Image (cartoon, rainbow, N blue to C red):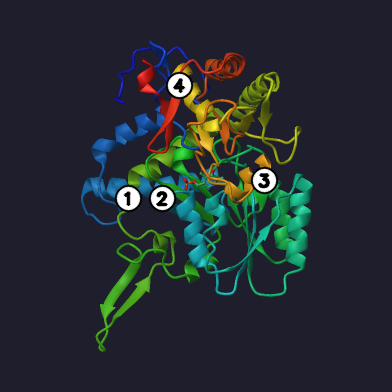
Amino acid sequence: MSLRPAALPSSVHAPLPVLGRDVLVPLVTGGEVGYAALDYAASAPALQRVWDDVAAYAPYYGSVHRGAGYLSQLSTDLFEQSRATVADFLGCRPGDQVIFTRSTTDSLNLLATAVPAGTSVFVFETEHHASLLPWRASDVSYLAAPRTPGEAVTTLEKALAAREQRGPALVCVTGASNVTGELWPVRELAAAAHAHGARIVLDAAQLAAHHPVDIAELDVDWVAFSGHKLYAPFGSGVLAGRADWLCAAEPYLAGGGASRRVARRADGGVDVDWHTTAARHEAGSPNVIGAYAIASACRALAEAGFARLVEREQALVARVRAGLAEVPGVRVLSLFGEDAARVGVISFVVEGWNSSHFAAALSAEYGIGVRDGLFCAHPLVRTLLGGTEQEPGECAAPDAAPGELPSLNAVRVSFGAGTPEEHVERFVDAVRELVADGARWRYRTEDGRCVPDRDQA
Ligand SMILES: Cc1ncc(COP(=O)(O)O)c(C=O)c1O
């Protein structure tokens, strides 16, 4: 595989232009086609605006919080302005902190280390592993998969009411599922949590690029998201919200930047006075480009207007769902049913097809990039597929021929503000054609990936 120069004119239309819109990829059947990036839920392409902002800043790059030079001062200002921009974007309350992390996973792990000792954590088994797994030091209750948004609220209420320990409690919930795209009733879950004296953190990894996330209006205590799913793939993420637990906790990482004063003690040890601002959990040299890129994406989304973006994305969702509904043997995975509100993330299985094989054919024969697997939400996908714990996990038996095996994983298509209609139309047509006519190529497993069999050429 090699990088291929852009050759297509920038003729594709989308509300927010992204990089890669002109990239050509080879087809196994011959020729080239413009790449249809339909895996935004994994990592969205960079916004052109973000790239331009980063490029404009790059010559001025300098150290942050640790330099007297002009460019260090400028970079420090830019980093702190980026924090303010993110706070605005999230509708933060006075006193909330915005901490730059590496990603949603990093943000939730940070919060997990900051919860007070004895905290009870409540998390639905349907969560992404980033929300499901970080709470290892706490007493965790895994709540059963609800089948309606209302059931999610009653399940949580019952679990909180039955809580025996009276200490602190924390609920962790996703805003939009990375498997079904379905929206969770965040405001209602927050109200239930607070009514029972618990706090709540919102995993907005799949929400923030698609919907406004207003921390005060949703009344959640923290929000976590990743830059690379918000069109800003420069290695940064965010944890924003209440300062008290964060200020009281040990720094997530120990080192320079987090410490205000360090002194040797007479007994030979070291005394450390840690910051009580966001810097407490940002030890090491900050990723100013990552933070600036996120701020740039926040500005671009806010200026484009979520009302317009949501309306247009809903039209794409409706098109894909209607297209898939017309193809025999395609089953779209859903927890909350047909009428659920959702973002542009849709997972499905095709009868008689192994999902890895199907995804490989979409790529090799149509130039369409989707994802196959269990999407780091193994319990949820197994529930939706009706599978068992013993079955193989991601990329199960990708070399199986169509019809040989029931699918043990799923295909996921996802899109957003940079997606032109043509990509969605091509995807729907390709699914219809593959199901009707079968793959035109043979596939096999190589290093755990399903790839076109070169021997067929
Ligand atoms: C709902 C959800 N939460 C958390 C994450 C983790 O995000 P990251 O890999 O950027 O840490 C993802 C990633 O797919 C996700 O979809």
- Marks 4 & 2, CB-CB < 8 Å contact: no
Mark 2 or mark 1, whichever is nearer to me? 2
Amino acid residing under circle 2:
Arg
Picture disc at residue 250: none
Q: Residues within 10 Å of mark 1 (few under 14, many from 20)?
A: many
Lateral position of residue 67 relative to residue 204, left or right = left
User: Is residue 201 among the parts visible in the rendering?
Assistant: yes
Q: Which residue is mark 4?
A: 442
Amino acid residing under circle 1:
Thr
- Tell me how far mark 4 sits from mark 2, CA to CA: 39 Å
- Tell me how far mark 4 sits from mark 3, CA to CA: 30 Å
As helix, strand or loop, the secondary structure at mark 4 comes to: loop
Q: Which residue is mark 1?
A: 76
Looking at the rendered image, the quarter that the N terminus falls into is top left
Amino acid residing under circle 3:
Thr
Mark 4 or mark 2, whichever is nearer to me? 4
Upstream in sequence: badge 4 or badge 3: 3
- Marks 1 & 4, CB-CB < 8 Å contact: no
Mark 2 or mark 3, whichever is nearer to me? 3
